Image: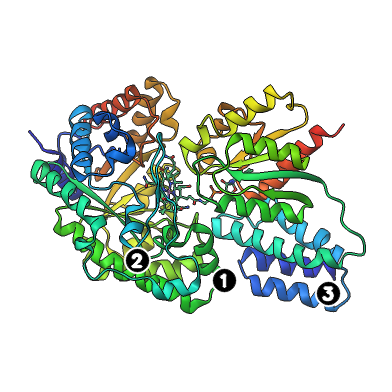
Amino acid sequence: MKNMISEQYQQAVFDTDRQLALQIVQNAIDNGVLPEEIVFDIVVPSIEDSISSVSERRYTNLAQHFMASQIAAEVTEMMVPLFRQAPEIVGKMVIGTSSGDFHGLGKRIVKGCLKAQMIEVTDLGLSVPAERFVDQAVELGAAVIGISSMMAHTARSENGSIGVRRLLKERGLEQQIRIIVGGTPYNHDERLYRTVCADAWARNGIEAGAVIVRLLGEIRP
Amino acid sequence: MTTALERLFLTAQGIPTDRIPVFCNMLEQGAIELGLPLKEYYSKGEYVAEGQLRLQKKYGHDNVWGLFYVGKEAELLGCRNIIYASDGPPNVGDMVVRTLDDIEKLKVPDDITSHPAFAEIKICMDILRRECAGRIPICAYVTSSMTLPAILMGMEKWLDLLMNGPAEARDLMLEKCNQFFRKEIRAYREAGANVLVYANAFGSLDIIPERFFRELSLPWIRRDLEEGGVEGVVYYCGGARMNPVIDQVYQATGIGTFYLSPLDDIATGKGIINGRALCGGVINDIELIDWTPEQVRMEVKRMLQAGMPGGKFFFGTILMPMSVPEQNIHAMIDAAIEFGAES
Ligand code: B12
């Protein structure tokens, strides 16, 4: 039965049909499916499904990413309080847009996707200076700093990823903290993440999850 | 000698001319020419016009712009805070629509040409018209009803409203943006613009699903253009891809020019247009920051080889980032002029 629910849920998310997706979850709960199963066996696989190249459901537009992330975050938020045991957190990260950049959508999508994957994300908001990224990561014990930029000049700025890298070096934090970047300029130039001294980038919020899990894995002994 | 305007006109008719038209969209670069900080540069129509004229003289491309920055449209609708950077375009720093109630309150000026935010545009356009009319195409930027809400309420809130409703609020927002659009395109035409870049990121399947495109984007494209017609209108998705929608947009409107995304395959785009309209092949100008002049030249050559067969083709950029080195701008335009002359 869970397979069938999962299939229906995935299709609803793909069709950006939030109402239907939430209804499917509600029906499942009413039929005795556990909240843990909803998150780990239905929501998370649906995120994976959307990036898997074997799936015929390839997410092609921004609205789908937006809705997939919103629905995943919404369902996860509803389910976690119902868990029998508090879920184990995979890792912690901070996220924000780079200094001078006021485009918050990319960040929001990424955040929603990560929530369901049990990555604890703290949102530092818009136009975050390099210093603040590092200070906050240290204070919160975050192992990954995520920086979103929608414009070429904010991606490349000395006060963006490049500045964060410099601070990590100066403070001897490079072993503990990884930098992931994303946003339009990176999608247009796949080597840009290296130019700005980041450790990784991701094309969309859905791929970001997998990449961040990998980065967290690198840090763990 | 063929003027830039004749070149565009002839190419659009499919009549061979000396070479293909070469568009290069530079905005902030005008401030560099004038040695002014961006905030000061954008404060006066005289400066922007002078910047455009100097750039055109210096690089020899075939167009000038009456656009300051896209956020101007938000200013015309009440935005009071524009955030300037020293090294890139200004951004909207204050959302006019924060709540659904604000949509109701959003006021479209009766006469946008008398709005203070239009005054400097008007000054700029008057100078451009005086200096370029009949010689160089003057471009204006008009954002579609489906896309304008992105700078009035933010991408995040607009996508939310679009996808999740309520439908009444969404439709009211679109209605008001459409009222604004009709006035804006008329104002620019009257001010002398002959190329009207119809910016519609939400008219690309990279941004919204097919169903939304059919049920919302397409009807609103029709409504945007029904009153003023499609003369001089260029379909442009803000850098997002358009090949999959070209046929539908053409069928619905008869728009005469499609300005592709750098991510669209040029030959495929031309195949879809199939001689019915003019096709702009567009370079990925973000990459121009790092390329060598030789790489730029080779890329231009590749693009023209894909686009020129069969005619009705021109070369263009999106919006050149400020950090593209001058030598790359020269390399790009010179290559487009050189290879664009071969028939
Ligand atoms: C829609 C759009 C617009 C809309 C809305 C803009 C807005 N958000 O406010 C409109 C038409 C109004 C517009 C205007 C402008 N735009 Co615009 N716009 C676009 C377009 C088509 C999509 C950008 C967008 O919002 N995407 C939404 C984001 C969320 O999508 P995404 O990048 O795919 O996000 C995913 C990934 O990047 C990733 N991701 C994002 N962040 C992060 C972070 C981490 C840590 C990770 C891992 C992943 C990740 O996950 C996301 C979700 O899946 C792009 C071109 C393109 N094809 O992308 C240009 C583009 C971004 N715009 C551009 C520019 C220049 C502008 C203007 C500044 C133009 C001007 N001179 O005025 C104005 C600014 C308006 C303002 N805000 O004041 C340029 C920027 C490049 C540059 N040269 O610097 C682009 C690239 C177009 C171009 N090639 O020239 N724009």
Q: In terms of secondary structure, where does tag 1 sit? A: helix
CB within 8 Å, label 3 to label 2: no
Q: Quadrant of the N terminus of chain A?
A: bottom right
Q: Which residue is mark 2?
A: B221
Q: Which mark is residue B164?
A: 1
The front one of B153 and B215 is B153
Residue A13 in the figure: left or right of residue B244: right
Q: Which residue is mark 3?
A: A29
Residue at 53% across, 29% down: A158
Vertical order, B258 against B39 (above or below):
below
Q: Earlier in the sequence, mark 1 or mark 2?
A: 1
Residue at 55% across, 40% down: A98
Marks 3 and 2, Cα distance to the nearest angstrom?
Answer: 43 Å
Is residue A48 visible in the rendered structure shown here?
A: no
The front one of A175 and B22 is A175
Residue A126 pos. (x, y %): 56, 48
Closer to the camera: disc 1 or disc 2?
1
